Amino acid sequence: MASGQLAFDDLCYYTLSHGDPSFIHQHVVDAFAAQSSTGHDKPIRLTFALVGLYLHVEEGFSGRRVQLAHMRLAQNKRQWPAFTLPHNRGAITVTDVIAVAEGAERDRMIHEWCASVWDAFRGNREIVMNLVRDIPPSAPRRAT
């Protein structure tokens, strides 16, 4: 995990200094949180990660729009659901992403990583979709 954490830290530096208003950093946080999740994490961590991955991969949300949806979802206190943690968390890892050259190629790899992780967690899709339906209406739900 140490090398994965170092790769995550390096990737965070890249995405936080990226300057793209779509805020791809959010996708990195969500993919890493889901992929490294354990049964000992706070339930909100995996919940927000899976909601973010769903909104990005299936609905085409930018990182900024995912971040806004997370804020809206957090407005209502609730007990967060339990999710099934798949053994395989996706074929692409943070170390694969950081190995790709910076720029458009790495940005595409971030999206592929998100899709890979979301596909691994797809068995939780119904739970995630129910949570997304609970996001207050002022939050954007469709990609524009």
Image (spheres, rainbow, N blue to C red):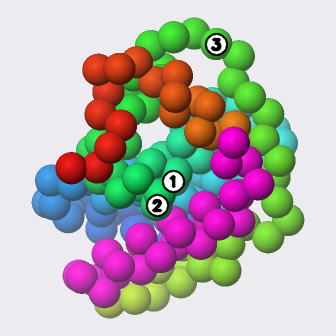
> What residue is disc 2 on?
57
The residue under label 3 is which amino acid type?
Answer: Arg
Looking at the rendered structure, the secondary structure element under dot 1 is helix
Disc tally is 3
Q: Which residues are the magenta region? A: 102-126
> What residue is disc 3 on?
78
Residue 14 at x, y percent in the picture: 30, 68
Spatial CA distance of label 1 from label 2 is 6 Å
Quick one: label 3 or label 1, which is nearer the N terminus?
1
Residue 76 at x, y percent in the picture: 51, 11
Residue 15 at x, y percent in the picture: 30, 62
Q: Quadrant of residue 123?
A: bottom right
Q: Does the residue at mark 1 contact the one at mark 2 (Cβ under 8 Å)? A: yes
The residue under label 2 is which amino acid type?
Answer: Val
Q: Quadrant of residue 88?
A: bottom right
Spatial CA distance of label 3 from label 2 is 25 Å
Spatial CA distance of label 3 from label 1 is 20 Å
Quick one: label 3 or label 2, which is nearer the N terminus?
2
> What residue is disc 1 on?
53
Looking at the rendered structure, the secondary structure element under dot 2 is helix
Residue under the point 67% across and 80% down: 91
Location of residue 136 with respect to 92 vertically, above or below? above
| Residue 36 visible somewhere in the drawing | no
Q: Nearer the viewer, mark 3 or mark 2?
A: 2
